Each structure stands twice: as C-alpha cells, then as structure tokens.
Amino acid sequence: MRRARWAWPLVLVPLALTIAWTGLNHDVRFVLGTLQTAGRAGLSPSEVFVHRPMAYRLVLALGDAGSSLPVPAREAVVRVLALVVVLLVSLLLRAGLVRYRPAGEATAVAAATGLALALAPNWDFLQPEWLAVVFAAGGVGAALRVRRPVPAALLGGALLALTVLVKYTTAPTAVVALGVVAVLDRRRAVLTGVLGAPLCLALFGLSVLIEPREWRWFGELSTLNGASPLSRGFAVSDARALFATVVNEALAVPMVALLPVSVAVLVRLAVGRRARLAWLLLPVAAILVVLAAVVLQGQWFQYHLAALVPFAAALGGLALVRWSAEHGGPPRALVLPAVVLGAGLPMVSAASTEWRQAHGTPVYAVLVVLVVVGVLLALKERGRTWPVAAVLGAAAVFVVPVWPSAPYSFDAIHADYTNSERVAAARLDERLFAPVRAQIGADTPVVYLAFGDMAYFFGNPANCRYPAPVFVQRGTYIPAVRGLRSYRENLDCLERTDAEYLVVQPSWLAVDRLPADVAAGVRSRFDCDRARPAGELTICPRR
C-alpha cells in the first residue's frame, strides 16, 4: 500500500469542504439554538431541556466556542473542534491497538475509524450516536493503552460512561466497545466494565444533583417518543421500517454496504474453525446490538445507525491490510465493489426525490447483488488488485456521504434533504430572518413556538427552560404527554411570559394546535394580525 500513499490526501479535499461549506444538521442546530437563546436569558445548559441528556448538552455547549461569530464561521469552528477531538481519539485508539496487534493493522483500524467519523453523513455528525462512538473509540484506546490495568480501566470506563450518558440509548455502543477490548484483553474488558458501570451511575447522579429535573426528564423521554415499540409492542410494520432504515443506510454509506464483504474477507483469512466462527458471529452480534437500540427508539432515523459507519470502516480497513499482508495486494472482493459504489451511488443519489422513491426496489436489488458477489468472491478467490485502485476506491467510498448531492436517506425519512439543499435552506433562513431581527432588536426577549433550528438562526433570548416547546408540540398528537409535569411547565412559558414577541413556525406548531385556553391566552397577549413575516416564521408583537 506504500505505493499509493500519495492518493490518501484526496480525502482532505472533502474534509475541507465540510468545514468551509456543509455546516451542521438541523438537529445539532436545534440543540445549539435552544442553548443559545436560553443562555442569553441567563439559563445555563444544565437547566435547559433540548430532548437530549445533560452530558450531551454540556459537550455541545463546550464545543460552541464561536457562538458570537456569523453562522458559517461559527459552524466551521464547531466542526474544526470536533475534528480535532476525532484526530486525538484516533491516535489514542491506535496507541492502544498497537500494543496487541501489528502496527499496520492498528493504523488501518484507527485511521478508518477516524475518517468515517470525520466524513460521516451530515445527519450523523455531532448527533449523540456519533458522539457516543467518539467516546467509545477513546474508551477502547484508553483501556488498552495505559500500562497499568486499574488506571486503564478507570479512564476507559469513564469514557464508556460518557458513551452511555450522551443519550442512554447509546449504551449498545459502549457494549460493542467493551467487546472490542475483550477480543484483545478479556481481563481489561471485565475490569473496564466493572469500574465503568458505577462511574456511569455516579456521573448520572451528579447530573441529577446539578439539575433535579434531569431525573424527571430521564423518565419522560420515552413518553415523548410515542412511536417506540417499548410502549406499544413490536409489530410487523416495525420489521419493515427497520429493513428500510438499514438498506437506506447501505445506500447512503457504502462502507455499511461493504460490511458483509469485509467480514467475509476476515473469515477467509482466519486460521482455524474457531477463529472463522468468531469472525462471523462477533460482527453479527455487534450489529444486532446496535439495531436493538434503533428498534427501541422506533423513529427510524438514519443517524440512529451512526455507530455502524465507523464499525464497518474499521473492519474494512483491517480486512484490506490483512489481505494485502498475506497476498501482496488489496483484495478484489473489496476493491471492485468499492469502486462501483463510489462511482455509482453519487449518480443515483443525485436523482430527484421522486425518482429515488419510484426506483428504490431495483436500486436495492443491484446493491444486494453487488454485495453477494463480493462475499462469494472473498470466500473463493485469492486475487489482488493494484494498490492505487484500492486507495482511490476507499477514498470514493469515504467521500460518498459528504457529496453535495448526498441525501439524508435514499427514499425514507428526509429523503428530500441533501447536503446542498440544507446549505441553501440555511442561507435563505439567515437572509429572511435578519431584517426582522434588526427591526425588533437582537436583545429583545421572545417566546418561541418553533423548532430549535429556527431559534438558532433567529437568536433572540427566550427566558424559558423549554425554548423549543417540545413537550407542547408532542402533546398535540401524543395524549400521554399532556399528563406530564414538564408539559405543564412548558405551557407556563406561554402563559406567564414577559416576551415582547411571539415567534411562530406554523408548520411545526401553530397557535391553533395549542389547548383552547392556552391559545386564547396567547392571542390575548400577542397580536398575530399585525405579524411580521420572516420566511417560515411569523413574528407576532405583544398587544
């Protein structure tokens, strides 16, 4: 592979593109927007509800070092800081792996993991599931790198505790990380798990001590997600939705599509029946653990599969290096499908949403055939390819998710969101909001009936623990939410407000969808007949 080292800098081009152009996804803007608008009213990140645990809120608040900059510069700073952390974690992971595996394998796994995180789909980037993988990779590296077992387990356990605490449903990612440690050093894995579990509980207890509502919010999160099979039982429709989510992920992220081929290559290279069986069963177990968390949430968002992306990349990197070491070059079974996917997926993904939704079945069929051929080739042949082709194929596979035309899903949820369309929408929101914000004053207090990314762009302070009224919005279609204490607190923000303006996003939460008495009170305080339009928003002055 040394002959192809010149080709690897190609990935720096899309990496720079994500920093300078792509920006952040709407969910991350939701969190940053609510933290910012509540923070300008004097509330700390620990006090604000944003549908994410305190650990995640604090990490994002810590990383939002450029919050006073214009949006493009602010988001570039956030991305750069995140990428620096990814680089450091990748180096720590390599340092841990190299104590147990050859340097080439350690480098390949760590580099593939880091690149998969750095060039993750935009919907994944900085989501709790993505951040959980960052902590998990650091936890694996720390548990294996520190020479003395107890300090190693303490540091690794602390990082795996954070893996869990950024969302709770990210606990499977910590389990997979412990499994990786166990494959290399069972004693350290057991010690890391034994010390990490109480550390996790202690950190959660500390968060409740800092903000007692955190315990209540922890219990209420499942109610907010009314679609979860946890509350209504698993149905055939859930199996179909899970299948659609997985195949959409395979089309959006070629590394995930190539995961069966990577496993087949590693099985082929394994010595002995027991080793071959382990290489077959352990990746399957890890995948099932990740899928269990997706089913538990029942929302079928692509970013819920974020842990599969670096996992697949790491196995692919390991398979590439091991085959090359044994056969003198990279395997055709991986390289040829990678080249086809790297060239073909950007073309079909760039098609219109209507075309993708109408032609999903034949595209999936071609993908399945390609993967099956790759698996059969891996199990039967002893061939190799030119190293430069392998590197170009790998670079193309890594770049597909960040291509400007890459959609958030092929034909499922947010299929009409592409990277370029999200950038254009953000610029339009900024342009439409700026004149109205200048008219009313950037420091004028408001109350929001809008998704958090609208608050992110509008930016005026909101003196409320629920700047984006998630409980009220969910209460319009999930009856159980209306019985929650936080729902009542959220309504108080509308009923007892000194805000000068009401900022409404009718497509997300119109005044008419509020309880009748609350809606009447809102109308008595704010005059939406004299509202100022601002893109998706309606700005109603106080009477």
Image: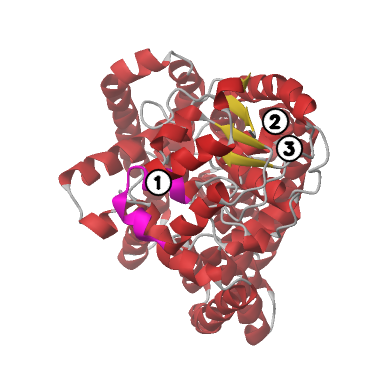
Identity of the residue drawn at 69% across and 80% down = 147
**Is residue 34 in sight in this rendering?**
yes
Single out the residue that lies furthest toward the left: 236
Was residue 483 drawn as part of the magenta stretch in this picture?
yes
**Residue density around tag 2, few if under 14, some if 14–19, many if 20 or more, within 10 Å:** some
Amino acid identity at mark 1:
Arg
Where the C terminus falls, by quadrant?
top right
Which residues, given as a range, are shown in magenta? 471-484
- CB under 8 Å between discs 3 and 2: no
Q: Determine which residue is flagged by label 3.
A: 75
Disc number placed over residue 435 in the picture, else none = none
Q: Determine which residue is flagged by label 2.
A: 7
Q: Nearer the viewer, residue 417 or 309?
A: 417
x then y, percent, for residue 405? 54, 20
Amino acid identity at mark 3:
Glu
Residue 125 appears left or right of 296: right
Q: Determine which residue is flagged by label 1.
A: 474
